[in-house]
Amino acid sequence: MTATDPSRALPIDPSVAPPGTRNFRDAGGIPADRWHADQNEETLVPTHCCFCGVQCGMYLRVDRAGKVFGVEPRNHDINRMRLCPKGINAYQQVNHPDRLTSPLMRRNRDEPFREVSWEEALDHTVAEIRRIQGEYGNDAFGLLGGASLYSEKTYLVGKFARVALKSKHVDYNGRLCMVSAAGANKLAFGIDRAGNPFSDILLTDCLLIAGSNVGECFPVMTQYLWGARDRGATLIVVDPRQTAVARTADVHVALKPGTDSAFFNAVLHVIVAEGLTDEAYLAAHTTGWDEVRATVAEYPPSRSASICGVPEEQIVQVARMFAGAGRAMAWHARGVEHHSQGVENCLTIINLCTATGNIGRPGAGYGTITGQGNGQGGREHGQKSDLLPGGRSISDPEHRRQICEIWGIEESELPAAGTSMMEMVWQMQRAEIRGLIGICNNPFVSLPNYATVKEGYDTLQFHAQFDFFLSETAANAHVVFPVTVWAEDEGVMANAEARVVKHNKAQEPPAGVRTDTWVMCELARRLGAGDKFAFPDSRAVFEELRIASAGTVNDYYGITYERLEETGGIAWPCPTTDHPGTPRLFEDGRTYHPDGKIHMQVVEWHPPMDPYSEEYPLSLTTGRTVAHFLSGNQTRRLGALVEQTPRPWVEVHPSHGFRNGDPVRVVTRRGSEVFPALVTEAIRPDTVFVPYHWPVPTAANALTVDALDPRSKIPEYKVCAARIEAAERVDEVPAPPTAPGQLAYPETQVSRTDPLPPTSPQGRGTAERS
């Protein structure tokens, strides 16, 4: 449609026109720039969003020159025509002026980057790998992958580290996301994935959401919550903040951060005391129930109410509501998992579902909401330090033998298990790891205790990073390889339901840009392992992945690209090409443990690792906001998203005496930063919240503690001791790094300097901006 000449606007009958319409038309109500949207020979490429674990279906609009220029929602059964602000703007990454299009290199960090040829960058990287490993051993060089990579690439990350680098040191940024849920699922069920599909939420009678700001972090998933409410389901939200979804809940439990396990133990205590357990189910399908029952007996509502800072009556209300429902479900996310007790927090929710018989039925079950787009698939096929493809244990002799046979190497050549992402940083500090390749991650923003992270990376003798924008971490590297965005390659991801979906290539990458697959295979060739990495494209990698997963719990063998195109997605395990997939687990009453039972686990609550004191009396908690994603390297460059949320803020309760926009210094044992106040009654008086998508000097993760869960090794992002105080002015948000010769993209610079917090609808403030 082309804009109409306002002088030729047709008169409108005021008796049939809505009020004001005539004035608008008579005034020539067209856009000031007289836009038009004609697009001949447009192609719509079906694919999925690159961001969160919902994995919404979308069409990328491609023009006659083969360039992505827009997006349309897709009527995929995951999202049914809905997209969130990030999904609507995601296409703008593809042809963004900040894209890296040439390798960057410098011999030391005191030099500026210079553009070099691929030959020079690859040769230098391989020379540094050989030098470091020659002097200090194979394990002196490490690799960190990412959970936003396609599964084909995550498979290659694990294989490249162990076969080409011959190093045990490989891990990935999903370590910062889902590993507590993974650990709990493996302990209880013998399998690491959500038990139910999203569609089961529509069938439940009671829905419990714990530690998940669904409305902002997974906006399109909200349709399932509203669908459940529409048919009469009750909603329980457990979160220190009154999020958008919590405001609509039947019960909002605003517990103190770091007290989840004490709360859920008390809920189960009430259920036991009031005879609301499903004893027949427990007898037939579980082990460990007697021990769990004895433990929760020590958590009466009076004790846990004191620990959690919630009313005793609320604990009783939640217990009766959940146990009294015919079908109840529990879903949780990072608010439960980002703790030094993350695995145990998850286990207490599993115990709750199990004790009430709410496992493995339509509308009754347990799920974990994956944060990253491939947070589920990204940990299944080998880039996690202790796992091999198919979820195999790297410590299991038979699992090692199977993979070595597929990879064509001797078992003695396969390294042992390595360490976690944060532990690798500590090893960098100690000069135990002296060289590193990073792929699809930005630890300078995403890891806790920034000062420690910076020191660890600065101690590296050599650091290479793969990325399509120059992230804060890449800006500190010696070599940066420019690689493709999601729309310039094809591959699969597994969403939060464990549904494997296919992303399709929409355009060719810019000249000078290569796929992550090509770079890893080329480095492997130069390191002498080219025969093990003869993959021309993602499809070839996926065929080997299928074979490597066959017969495992994480079985992808029956999934093919063609079947994914036909079906829109298949939930694993899927052992044969005529198998429909497994959207719902445990329907036959059996888990994936050899005895087929749910192994219930005893959990004792313990306080967070960063102790409170007179100097640090408050809890600092962190999280995401609707306009941004993870470290913000992608979303902080998209104008509409920066305009919506230009900077971080600190949410504080009115009892602290601040006004909206006041500069507030947040102080922890790691340091201090100043944010504008967003004054709101939607947060506990003893808690403050800062979103974490920005770098220093406005980085929430400059303040968080690098304490780890002893089992999952996930950092305790969601609680550390803090204090707040008045300050003079807020810290300025830095512009995203750019490559040599690039200018900061002006569209993202103006609103970035706004000193105020976001508008009240997003930030849930009680005061208007002035």
Image (cartoon, rainbow, N blue to C red):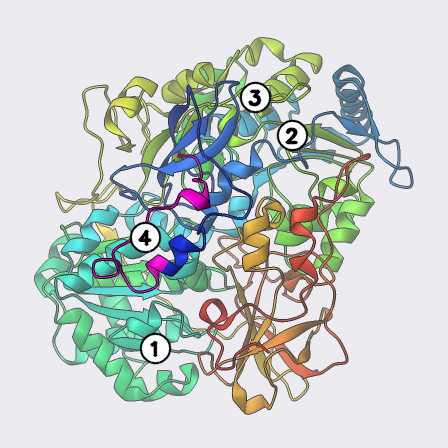
Question: The residue under label 4 is which amino acid type?
Answer: Met
Crowding near pointer 3: few (<14 within 10 Å), some, many (20+)? many
Contact, mark 2 vs mark 4 (Cβ under 8 Å) = no
Distance from label 4 to label 3 (Cα)? 31 Å
Q: Which portion, as a residue range, is magenta?
A: 1-22
**Toward which corner of the image does residue 317 lie, by quadrant?**
bottom left
Is residue 474 inside the magenta stretch?
no
Percent coordinates x, y for residue 757 in the rendering: 59, 70
In the rendered structure, the answer to whether residue 58 lies left or right of residue 120 reads: left
Q: Can residue 107 be seen from the camera position used here?
A: yes
Percent coordinates x, y for residue 765 in the rendering: 49, 77
Q: Can residue 385 be seen from the camera position used here?
A: no
Q: Which one is in front in this view, the residue at disc 2 or the one at disc 1?
A: 1
- Helix, strand or loop status at disc 1: strand
- The residue wearing badge 3 is 517
Quadrant of image for the N terminus: top left
- The residue wearing badge 4 is 221
In the rendered structure, the answer to whether residue 611 lies left or right of residue 174 reads: right
Residue depicted at 27% across the width and 71% down the height: 236
Which sits earlier in the primary sequence, circle 2 or circle 4? 2
Residue depicted at 56% across the width and 25% down the height: 414
- The residue wearing badge 1 is 253
**Toward which corner of the image does residue 306 lie, by quadrant?**
bottom left
Dot label at residue 111: none
In the rendered structure, the answer to whether residue 657 lies left or right of residue 580 reads: right
Distance from label 4 to label 1 (Cα)? 21 Å
